[in-house]
Amino acid sequence: MSETADDDADETLMLAYAAGDASAFDRLYARHKGALYRYVLRHCANAAVADELFQDVWMNVIRVRASYLPAARFGSWLFTLAHNRIVDHWRASGQVKMVPLDDDDETVAPSALVSPSRDEPDARASASETSARLRAALAGLPPLQRDAFLLHQESGLSLAEIGHLTGVGVETVKSRVRYAVTRLRAALPGLGEHA
Amino acid sequence: MTADREPIDPALDAMLRENPAETPPAHVDAAILAAAHRAVASAPRAYSRRHWRVWLPLGAAATVAAVVIGLHPLERQAPQSLPASDVPVTAAAVQSGATPDRSNAATTPVNPQPAAAANAQSHAAMSPARPASAPVRAAPRRDEAAAESAAPPARLEAPANARDAPGAASAQRASEAGVTSKQASREVRVGDAIERIRALRRDGREVEAAAALVQLRETVSDADARLPPDLRDWASAVRR
């Protein structure tokens, strides 16, 4: 039974899924899987780990469907789940020591966070050199800057929503994104050729 | 696109956009979609659950109202004087044409069935007998007493001279007890819900525990305040 149209809002689809309409989930998944996967993958720089975390996020969506309330945009809720899952992954892997929110503090060595994918079979088989360069450059960012940049890039959320999701103010989000862009441009020579 | 969403760096944005094949593998897609379909196929429909949440309180309120209304007539059944027409008559009285006598009401047989036959014959022109399942009224008339064979005996006795003060008081006590017991049962249900939440958390079923808390919040306005200390911290993090 499907009473939702293709142009239904995400929140409508999620509520329909919670009410038992599996096809609503199919549409929701198709809309958001790409952006969410890129967000997770570019955090992990390891496809196998990214697949696992990506799947965990959606399993969480499925599990809590009954208690879903459209108090905020679905996208904001979805990326909040993803962000939290990634933070949990960092904690569990011991790769991150929690630091104060003023993340310009460089005490966390970026290279310790996400190992570049140079030695990963996925990277060697990667269809795109650009992709490998990009992932390496992202891996070199401090995690909070990378997170702010990827949320801005992939989630479709406003800076205010990203700030709410990550627990910081809008100006901090802007600062993190700007800093990330500066470092990425420095790490990606020839970037201007893609403009 | 608002200024908030404009690409900060067009060149970098273009590089990110052109990046191919950053999509989940097919086996991951399949696993997620299969899990999503299994979850709703095996769960009871939320449609019925939501409607249950809506209709159960209404049903309970209607039941309480029916009980109160049903008990209320017992309070007014002080038979100071019943109209003659309301006094059940015996078959003998009908045959003899005797006028219904209130003084005989106390000895009027409780069982309305003999009177039913007489009444049905002699009062066929009057309003039709109601089915046995019809709701009981405060002062059943002769023509209705026949049909209300399921009515409690006390209602049909209606002794003319007996003052039903004890009955009225007991009815009132029953009503009050009903309200008190309703409150008590409600407290028990809240307690049960809290224990269920605690048990779910103990078993690591956090999502179900959160769903149970949400449901409790919908039932009780001060649900969080009723939680024991060991659950309050967790509850504060549960999405409302």
Image: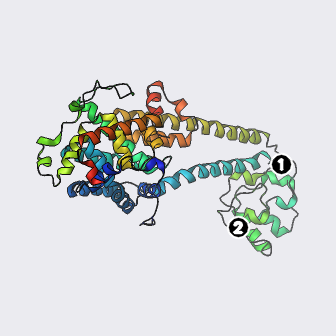
Name the residue: 47% across, 37% down.
Answer: A170
Which is in the foreground here, disc 1 or disc 2? 2
| Residue type, numbered disc 1 | Pro
Q: Secondary structure at mark 2?
A: loop
Within-10-Å neighbours for mark 2: few <14, some 14–19, many 20+: some
Image-based side of B89 in relation to B4, left or right: right
| Residues under numbered marks 1 and 2 in contact, where contact means CB atoms less than 8 Å apart | no
Tell me the quarter of the picture where residue B26 sits: bottom left
Tell me the quarter of the picture where residue B137 sits: bottom right
Mark before the other along the chain sequence, 1 or 2: 1
Q: Which residue is mark 2?
A: B130
Name the residue: 33% across, 41% down.
Answer: A181
| Residue type, numbered disc 2 | Arg
The span from disc 1 to disc 2 (Cα, nearest Å) is 24 Å
Q: Secondary structure at mark 1?
A: loop
Q: How many marks?
A: 2
Q: Nearer the viewer, residue A13 or B98?
A: A13
Name the residue: 45% across, 41% down.
Answer: B212
Identity of the residue furthest to the bottom in this view: B125
Q: Nearer the viewer, residue A184 or B60?
A: A184
Quadrant of the image containing the C terminus of chain A? bottom left
Subunit under mark 1: B
Relative height, residue A21 to residue A62 (above, below):
below
Within-10-Å neighbours for mark 1: few <14, some 14–19, many 20+: some
Q: Nearer the viewer, residue B163 or B71?
A: B71
Quadrant of the image containing the N terminus of chain A? bottom left
Residue B59 seen:
yes
Residue B203 seen:
no
Say the numbered circle drawn on residue B79. Answer: 1
Q: Position of residue B108 (x, y in %)?
A: 77, 55
